[in-house]
Image (cartoon, helix red, strand yellow):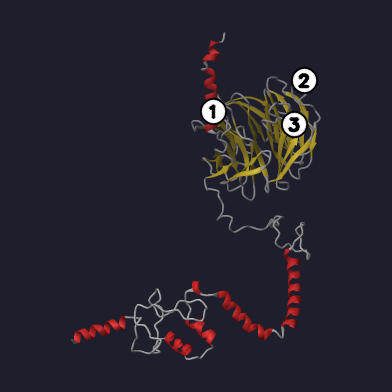
Amino acid sequence: MSQFNFVSDLQNALILDGETRGPPPRWQKKLEASLNGSVNTTRSVLSVSYNTSFSGVQAPMKTPGKCADAKTNKKQTPTKTPGGGDRFIPNRAATNFELAHFLVKSDKGEEESNDSNENNVKASAHKDERQKLISEVAQVPEGGQAAGGSRILCYQNKAPAAPESHTNPLKVVYSIKTPISTKSGSRYIPTTSERILDAPDFINDYYLNLMDWSGDNIVAVALGSCVYLWNAASGNIEQLTEFEEGDYAGSLSWIQEGQVLAIGNSTGAVELWDCSKAKRLRVMDGHSARIGSLAWNSFLVSSGGRDGLIIHHDVRSANHKISSLSGHNQEVCGLKWSTDFKYLASGGNDNLVNVWPLASSGVGTATEPLHQFNEHQAAVRALAWCPWQPNTLATGGGTADRCIKFWNVSNGSLIKSVDSKSQVCALLFSRHYKELISAHGFANNQLTIWKYPTMVKQADLTGHTSRVLQMAMSPDGSTVISAGADETLRLWNCFAPDPLASKKVSSVKSMAKQSVFRQSIR
């Protein structure tokens, strides 16, 4: 029988609802105190009967274990909690909260009845003062300014812009620019060079033009006292000529069609070379100092020198000198004929830009400029004519100016001016997109692509470690070659045509050629 007693004792110890031999639990002590009248009758009923409505009658408790008998005044076991613990959880659904709230307020009402009048006056005054402060702060008029002049709870105006010297440290974290390309509208622009060529002894002179790309895909570049030809298709390199010691080439320019190269040297003469035979054709003099710029117009080649003169040479005639223009008082460092060959633009070290109209005879230009622009604050070397707007001229200034300006040569007005933040060395318009590329110097030595005419920056092409002095475009208009003072030539495939657009054009052409309806018409 002893084993059965042990099992019975063990079960009694594990049952939480029955009586235990240890000290009474906390809830049991509170229950005894409430039954013995330690609190008033109303509160004792509330503390004892949480699961009944407030009717003054205690509801019977249902317990799975032992129950207390009211007649014998034995202790009752409270309702078993869902978690099996010793904490009593009342049934809130059966409680009359409205009556309980009324009784609590009625008790406090008797004590506060005497001071109600004084408190009401103070409370109303405090409430009025608080409402006044809130109205002054929160109720902002339509203008967006509060009574004190501060902007509170106002989102109608934009936040003020940060100062120019401020740099956002999180810009790199939130940048969407990839290291190899950047998205420009609907196309990607590679920001790294496709190919790099060594150019030792490339002269670091802002006023010289030492590189050009021909229609036959040959790049001519002057390195020191030599002139080299690089075939972009085959990669072959050959030396065209070498000047005597102390002399050098100051400018290079290809004829529009053919393999004739014009070289302006440091002695003030223009040499014509047939590059297919590596033979010099003729020498045309006229300048008293070096020639830093050349521009072709069919059989006419225009040269600009350090003496401030612009001379038109007719390469067909023995008396090659047609006219001489004296619109600059310092070195002429930029020359460019318009795409329709009606105007010649010249830029000089005197910060002037002259636009010369075509002569009435159709050969050369007038002796007086049509327009003279003096808004630049530094030497103007970068010149470019818009291919789809022949009357639009883009000019770029040097270190003291750093601006790219657009001119309407029809009426001589300034269309737009943009501060590029660095020296502008060269400008080129794209043939496939309405974009402009500019070459710059310190501090980033980059090539920048701009959207025209908004002049929104599309991409920066970086890689040169010194200023970019020269740019030229491939015959198909897809690649730009840049020459830097770091003695490197870099090729950028930044204007590659859209393959989808070219397919659409070719499909339309093929459909037009293969149309049966058109073939049946006689």
| Horizontal and vertical percent position of residue 201 | 58, 42
Image quarter (top left, top right, bottom left or bottom right) of the N terminus: bottom left
Check the image and report above or below for 216 versus 307.
above
**Local crowd at mark 1 within 10 Å, few (<14), some, or many (≥20)?**
few
- Identified by mark 1, the residue type is Lys
Under tag 3, what secondary structure?
A: strand
Mark identifier at residue 302: none
Check the image and report above or below for 320 versus 13.
above
- Identified by mark 3, the residue type is Ile
When asked about the image quadrant of residue 508, the answer is top right
Of labels 1 and 3, the one closer to you: 1
**Residue, disc 1:** 504
Nearest the eye: 457 or 118: 118
Of labels 3 and 2, the one closer to you: 2
User: Is residue 204 visible in the rendered structure shown here?
Assistant: no
Dot placed on the residue nearer the N-terminal end, 3 or 2: 3
Dot placed on the residue nearer the N-terminal end, 1 or 3: 3
Image quarter (top left, top right, bottom left or bottom right) of the C terminus: top right
| Horizontal and vertical percent position of residue 163 | 70, 57
When asked about the image quadrant of residue 112, the answer is bottom right
Q: Is residue 83 left or right of residue 312?
A: left
Mark identifier at residue 310: 3
Q: Residue at x 52, y 89 (%)?
A: 39
**Residue, disc 2:** 361
| Horizontal and vertical percent position of residue 267 | 69, 34
Q: Are marks 1 and 3 in contact (CB under 8 Å)?
A: no
When asked about the image quadrant of residue 63, the answer is bottom left
Nearest the eye: 472 or 313: 472
